[in-house]
Amino acid sequence: MQAEAGDIKSMYTLAICYRDGDGTKQDFEKFTDWLTRLRKRIDFNAKIKSILSFQDRPESELKKFVQWVQASTTSGSATGCHYQAMLYREGVGVEKNLNKYIE
């Protein structure tokens, strides 16, 4: 299912189906659940865009951001680990390394 895979349009459409009872039983709990998932997905996409926007920032800002990500990863932050994976995937502030991205 595309909504389960994180497709934003499909997530919204499914939420509306549950709200209106279109093609399924009307279920406001599922409607709310899908809207919450949608909001989190949109927030996630915004974080990715903010990471990638660092490519156009001065080297000093990029270096500080990479240091922050590495420090938060070392402290066990899930968000830091996520950011670090994105940096390796895109090669932003670090050498692009898909093996480290997958770790």
Image (cartoon, rainbow, N blue to C red):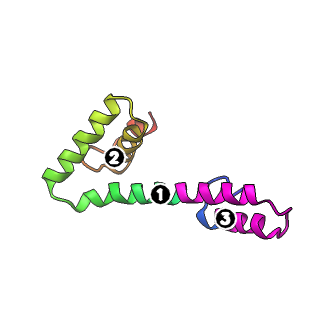
Q: Which residues are magenta?
A: 11-40
In the image, residue 45 lies at what x, y percent? 46, 58
Can residue 3 be seen at all in this image of the molecule?
A: no
Q: CA distance from mark 2 to mark 1?
A: 18 Å
State yes or no: discs 2 and 1 in contact (Cβ < 8 Å): no
Q: Residue at x 41, y 41 (%)?
A: 79
Q: Is residue 67 above or below residue 36?
A: above
Please, what is the three-letter code of the amino acid marked with disc 3? Answer: Ser
User: Looking at the image, is 25 positioned above or below residue 98?
Assistant: below
Depth check: 60 or 14 in front?
14
Q: Nearer the viewer, residue 70 or 77?
A: 77
Q: Is residue 2 magenta?
A: no
Closer to the observer: label 3 or label 1? 1
Residue highlighted by disc 2: 87
Q: Give the quarter of the image for residue 64.
A: top left
**Residue drawn at 17 percent across, 52 percent down:** 61
Q: Which mark is residue 43?
A: 1
For badge 1, the amino acid type reads Asp
Vertical placement of residue 54 versus 19, above or below: above
Q: Residue at x 40, y 55 (%)?
A: 47
The prevailing secondary structure element of the residues shown in magenta is helix
Mark 3 Cα-neighbour bin, 10 Å: few <14, some 14–19, many ≥20? some
Residue at the extreme front? 28
Q: Earlier in the sequence, mark 3 or mark 1?
A: 3
> Mark 2 falls on what kind of element?
helix
